[in-house]
Structures are given as C-alpha cells and as structure tokens.
Amino acid sequence: MLDRRAARFDRARAVSLNETVSPAAPALTDSRLAALCAEEARNALDDYAARFDEITRRGRDRFLARDWRGSYDDAAERLHLYSRVLDSLTNTIKGLLAARLCDRGIWSAIKAVYSALIGHSSRWEIGESFFNSLTRRIFTTEGVDQAIEFVDTDFDAPPTSVGANVGRIYSGAPLRELLQRVLTDAEAGGFAESCWNDLPGSLAAAAERLTHAIGQSGEAKLELVGATFYRGRGAYLVGRVCPTDDAASVVPVAFCMRHTDQRGIVLDALLVGEADLAILFSYTRAYFRVDAPCPFALVRWLRELMPRKSIADLYNAIGYNRHAKTEFYRDFVRHLQHSSDHFVTAEGTRGMVMLVFTLPSYDAVFKLIRDRFDAPKNSDRREVMSKYKMVFEHDRAGRLVEAHEFEHLRIARDRFDPALLDELLRSTGATVRLDGDDVVIAHAYVERRVRPLNLFFAECDADEASAAACGYAEAIKDLAASNIFAGDLLTKNFGVTRHGRVVFYDYDELCWLTDCNFREMPQSTSYEEEMAAEPWFTVRDNDIFPEEFPNFLAFPERAQQELFRRHGDLFHPDFWRGVQQKLRAGELPELLPYAQERRLGAS
C-alpha cells in the first residue's frame, strides 16, 4: 500500500515538473488539476480506511492469543495513522498544484469533484472531515470557509445504505439458549465453544442477571451489534434485550469478556442499562477497535442505546476522533445559533497555567494556555502542550478527560461576558485577538465539563463525600497502574462526572510514574533541623514524599477518615514503589471499565 502511495506521488511530481519546467508541455487546466487532486484525496481516504480496518481487525487475533503488548501497540499505530496518511497526501497535493496551491477557485472545484467521488463510500462523513484536515493544513483557515470545507455535510441524507444493518437479532428460544447463541456466534463476533472456560456457568449467571433486569424468565429477544468491541485486554458484545411480549421495555446490555489464562475466555461481567454502557463508552477511556463498515450506521445504532451520549462522543469511542471533532464543532455552532447566553469563566479555582471558560448552556469547557504562568509554575507553553499530547497518546485509564485540540476558532464577540473577554485579551493575548466583531482563538483545548471536586465537597452530603473521596483515591491508583503520576493532587484538579466517577483534568504536572523517586520523609536529628523553615535535606526535582500528601488535602472530616481507612497506602512510599516495580517488569495494567459488583463472580 505504501509503495502504491509513493508511486502516485512520483507521478504527481512528474506532472507538476512537466507543467512548470518543460516549456513543451501544456499546462494542465484548472478543471483537470482539480480532478487529479480530488482523485488523490479519495485514494488517500481509501488508503486510510483500508489500513484502519486492517489494524482494527487484528483485535480478535490479539485477544485470542492474549497478546496484550501487541494490542496496545496496535492502538498506538492506529492513533497515528490519520496524520501519517495526511502527511503523504499533503505532499502529493503540493506537488500537483505547485504555484496554484492557494488558488481557492481550484480548491472549490476540488471539493466538488471529491464530494461526488465519496458519494458511494460507506465512510463519506469520515471523508468530509479528512478533506477538511487537508485544506486546513494548506490554508490555516480562521473560522470556517464553506467554499473549500465541508462545514455542513454535502448530503441531506446518507448517500449509501452499505452496512446499515448493524444489529443481529436472536429470538424464539429461552433466554439461556439465546445467550449461548450470542456468545458462540463467530459470524457476529462471538467465540466457538472450545474457546470458553466454563461456558455453562457463564450462561447460568448471565441468564439470572438478565432475568432480573427484564423482570421475567420466559422468552426474550436479543439484538447485538454484529461485531465485537476490543480495547486493552477486554472484548465486548453490545446490544439490547427486551421481553418478547413488551417491545417497549428495551434494556441496553454489554457482555464483557476476558481471556486471562490458557483455560479460555470467561464472561467476566454483564452490564445492564444506559448508565453502565455510558461508563464503558466514556470519554475518559481509550478508543475501541470494532469492525464498522459503516460508521454512520453504527454510531446511530449505539445512540439508541445511549441517547445522552453525543454523536461526537460515539465517533470518538470507535476511533474516529478527527471526525468526532467535526461533529462537535457542528453541534457547537448549531447550539450558538439557538442560544443567547454568554461565555463566562468556568467555575472552580483559577488556574495558574490555563484560563478556562465555558458557555453555561453547553456541556464543555475551553482551556487556553496563559501567556505567563503564576509562581511556582516554571514550565512553558511547549511543555504544557507536550503533556496534553501525552494524554492523547496514552491509555487514559478511565480517569483522564480527553481534550480535543482546536485551532483558529472564530466566535462572535458579543457572546463573551465583558469581564471574561478582558481577561482573555490580558492573560492569553498570544492566543486571542479581536477581528472586527469576532474573537479569534488561535489554539484551545476543549473538554467535557465536570464538577470540580472541591466544589462538589462543598455541596454534597456526607455519604456522597465519602464515596467521592474514595473515588479520588481510586482515580490516583488507576492512573498509577497506567504509569501516570498526576503531580498536583489538590482536589481542585479533579472532577466528578454525571455518573459520579472521579476524573483528573489538570495535566501540566503529569509525568511518568517510573520517572519519580518516592521517598520516606527523613527524620530530623536535631531541634534546629526540626524547626528549619526550608528542607534541611537534599531534594531532587523528581523526589516525591507521599507522607506529605495529607498536608495539602482538604476533605470533609468523615470523608477523610474513610479515605485513610480504605486507601491509606497512598501515603506511604511502599505502595508507589510496588507499582513501579510491576511497571518496570513489563506488567500491563488491567483496569476494568465497570464496577466490581457488575462482575458475574461478585457475590
């Protein structure tokens, strides 16, 4: 595939040289050049889709072979695939267009031809975002340009029905028999009976839980996505169940499989209900690998199971993060057109590195890097951006909020609260400027809005506070297991999602856990040492003293007691050194995307 792409680039470069250097060769007409460029863009899209699918389909083999290192490597390879293909395409287009590279008339024609070429593709919407990425590499567009970008889709309705039949239906038998069909249907992502460890036991436990969920023990109907979702060490079958006599009582479900040893696959958990599935598909987790011939159809089908999930979230979950940005932007623009509230400073403690604002009626925050950082912060813009890149490329362990990176946003000036706008111009002047009636933001990170943990503690009851305090500790431990040390452990840097999960969102002090040196606090040997205002012992930049953590934490009293009772090991170096030892030995984390009580072995 790469050889063919290289050959196409050589041909394109030859055409360009023929046109611009050889006086004997007639120049290509604008329309011919537009057609050639559109074909190259379509070919690059096909190349991207083929390689994306190839990596995705390896998920099943990795799972069956318990090749977890290969699984993580595949995830990383697919994550970088988009940029690599786009780099090659950009070079090809530059070679073809040469002196006419920035001719918007030609680009408008390229877009029209390209739109026709992708009209029969089952990934036409991915193709539109792919083209937008190309034009923005060429033009660095501020705001949007309808003439050369797919600001809105070119299609009023899906132009193709390929892959529209997402679900497979299982009915006409007792529930336990249906479950056996689901789990062993290899054509729909299941596994042969010989691959399973104690399949009868799994079937009995799953049937009992589903019977309780739908309120009857008779026949039911199961409808499952006809492909398995792979991520990390897990494999998931996702769908819905309903009693045959009550089609309106549909219950979303997910069958969670693990393959931990040579005895075979186990059905580790059964998730029931929208909330369980929403956590499985959380924006704090790595992307699934699922064979989706028609992403449009799969995303709409999943949204029937999780109606509170945005279209952007679901594209993100199945690995199309660039198109997820397109869907987010389109939804954001529609919301601006149908709302009138103003952007204001986001709730929470003022950030020393990031200026954060939000639109109260919209579930997102916009984070801009300040021009200067308050003491004691001593990093710079480049370092901060590298931390956000680190989060994007790493397994977020269900605890790091994904940040989408946007450039050259253009928003009407009258939508900003005057105090916020003054602060933006004063503190982020290198990033924000006024252009007539618009505010232009050169660079921003956009994240899902969560409730800051310090504010949550101020408004919740004692039981909720205790649960959140333990969630805070579990978040730190989950991050540690994935080789992340959060750095700044103050509660203002953590948030609570609508499902009550505690997540982390302040990334400027993130580092690899294995780079840290966890130490005991040295004991003073004299009164002078004990009373010294500054440390009397040597402290290196990577030295961490867990015994000091409680000095910086502010929890409600009962919540703090519960935190120390259940997670007191966080405040001792031995815990951290133990995690480091496992990581350095090559152990990969097993971070389950569901609560312990959802496991079928739970009492």
Image (cartoon, grey):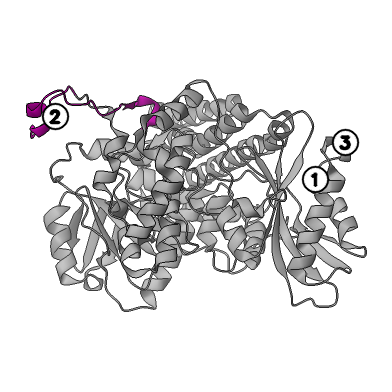
* Of residues 537 and 37, the one drawn nearer to the viewer in this rendering: 537
Which one is in front in this view, the residue at disc 1 or the one at disc 3? 3
Sequence-first disc among 2 and 3 = 3
* Of residues 219 and 209, the one drawn nearer to the viewer in this rendering: 209
The residue carrying mark 1 is 190
Horizontal relation, residue 154 to residue 485: left or right: right
Residue 100 locus on image (x, y percent)? 36, 42
Dot 1 falls on a residue whose secondary structure is loop
Contact flag, marks 2 and 3 (Cβ < 8 Å): no
* Residue 331, numbered circle: none
Residue 360 picture quarter: bottom left
Neighbor class of circle 3 (other Cα within 10 Å; few <14, some 14-19, many 20+) is: few
Measure the alpha-carbon separation of dots 1 and 3: 12 Å
Measure the alpha-carbon separation of dots 2 and 3: 62 Å
Contact flag, marks 1 and 3 (Cβ < 8 Å): no
Residue 528 drawn in magenta: yes
Per the rendered image, the range of residues in magenta is 512-538
Residue 299 locus on image (x, y percent)? 62, 59
* Residue 194, numbered circle: 3
User: Quick one: quadrant of the N terminus?
Assistant: top right
Residue 533 locus on image (x, y percent)? 8, 35
Q: Residue at x 47, y 64 (%)?
A: 498
Q: Amino acid at mark 2?
A: Pro
